[in-house]
Amino acid sequence: MKKLLLCLTFCIFAFSAIVVVGNESPSIVLFNGTVVTMVAEEEFHEAIAIAGNRILAVGSDSEILALAGSETELIDLLGAAVYPGFIDPHTHLLNDSWNKGLSPVDTQKLALRYGVTSAANMYTSPDLVETYIRMANRGDMRVRFSLYLIYNTSCGDVLGHWYTGYDPLVELAPRLRIGGVKIFSETSVCGDEFIGISFTPELNASLSPGGLEWYGGNRPLFLQAELADVIRTVSEYGFPVAIHAIGDGGVQLSLDALEEALNGGPNDLRHTILHNLFIRDDLLTRYADLGIIAAVESMSSCFADFYRDLLPDQYKHIVRRWADLVATGAHVTADSDWPWSAEEAISPLFRLQALMSPINHSQSYGDWEPCGLLPEDQLLTAWQGLRMMTIEAATMLHRDHELGTIEPGKLADLVLLSMDPLHTDVDQLTKIEVLLTMVDGVIEYQRRAIDDP
């Protein structure tokens, strides 16, 4: 009989939505809303309890409110949606803030306004690391940052293994850690004009005259064995790599070198390829086969049209294959590369719309009009896009154990939205307001009082 009662008690607890970590009273309770955990597509709750900088519990209003103590701050959500804070795993918010006439502190304010709680700064030189450590120690990191230290510059100049002076994947200062090492497999913006997308000889031979004029002479910066050796050395020190690769030449080189460096082993360090704009059929399944993470940007139909126009008919489909990548089972995360992107791309909701809609919604590309349509078979669902900006991004940054979903024990990085993007028409996604952004259980941005009209 005693065993039966224990079993019944356990079953009742397991059926309940609430899971509590620890015995402390919550410091904040958010209730009367829709808590979207991003764990499973149909998993929703009404309320969430926060203790300090951690999520204490999620569940129904009655369950969570019962946890509140006399000092607990109660916030009535009035039906608003709570999501994990958005994570942007490829930005230049810190190092290129000057591009927008802003300071690194100002660009963080902008990111928080759009619900971004964590980001990777994907170009960090030796002098900048120390600058950002000083910023963090002053309390100027309001967004949680992972720094990627550059092995070579966007012009191809090699800095070498200077990154070994730092420890990877541990906090250097409040809200600041080293995320990995950035490698350019092909040149990028260099000076005022040079953008060195590289194509394989086979594809290069079939580029349009405009494509040949722009990109015909560009080649990857490494031989396969050279890049594989760099990846092995970086890996031995415990650093993930993020490889810049746009053209099919850069993508193929990166995949080949990663396969050689891994030598049949698992991708435990979660090495990543950035951009991945031109993916041939024979390259598509290799990401999942090798366990390589693909980080991609939302792109307007105008920009995709421009790149497709460089290619003959038989290759036009290799541009912007985001749905094809997701379908292979590969880990795919959606980033902004901001400010090297559309002005609006700082907003995850704008980027979600660009992943889901065939038409151009960007005012930044107005000069490129008229634009064609993105292929319908490359559009993603809201669930897929939101996962790419939350838990998939956290996975790339080795933070999925503490970020990316709303679960007890995880860090209280949250965003409060006026409407639930999972149940909002695609044309209305950018009309959703970010009401509140929270990092470490601290409200870092609040548009207005939640109950204001």
Image (spheres, rainbow, N blue to C red):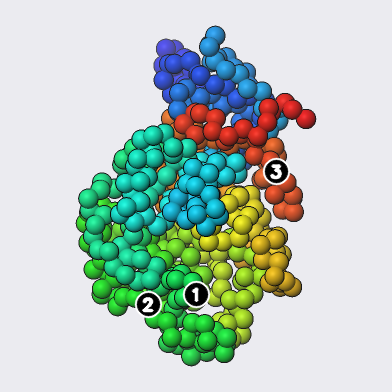
Q: Which element is circle 3 on?
A: loop
Q: Which mark is residue 368?
A: none
Looking at the rendering, in which quadrant would you find the C terminus?
top right
Mark pair 3, 2: CA separation: 42 Å
Circle 1/circle 2 CB separation < 8 Å: no
The three-letter code of the residue at mark 1 reads Glu
Q: Which element is circle 2 on?
A: loop
Q: Horizontal and vertical percent for residue 48?
A: 56, 26
User: Horizontally, is 343 left or right of 288 in the view?
Assistant: right
The three-letter code of the residue at mark 3 reads Ile
For disc 3, the marked residue is 432
Out of 279 and 150, give the one closest to the viewer: 150
Residue at (28% x, 68% y) in the render? 158
Q: Is residue 271 above or below residue 169?
A: below
For disc 2, the marked residue is 220
Residue at (45% x, 23% y) in the render? 52
Mark pair 1, 2: CA separation: 18 Å
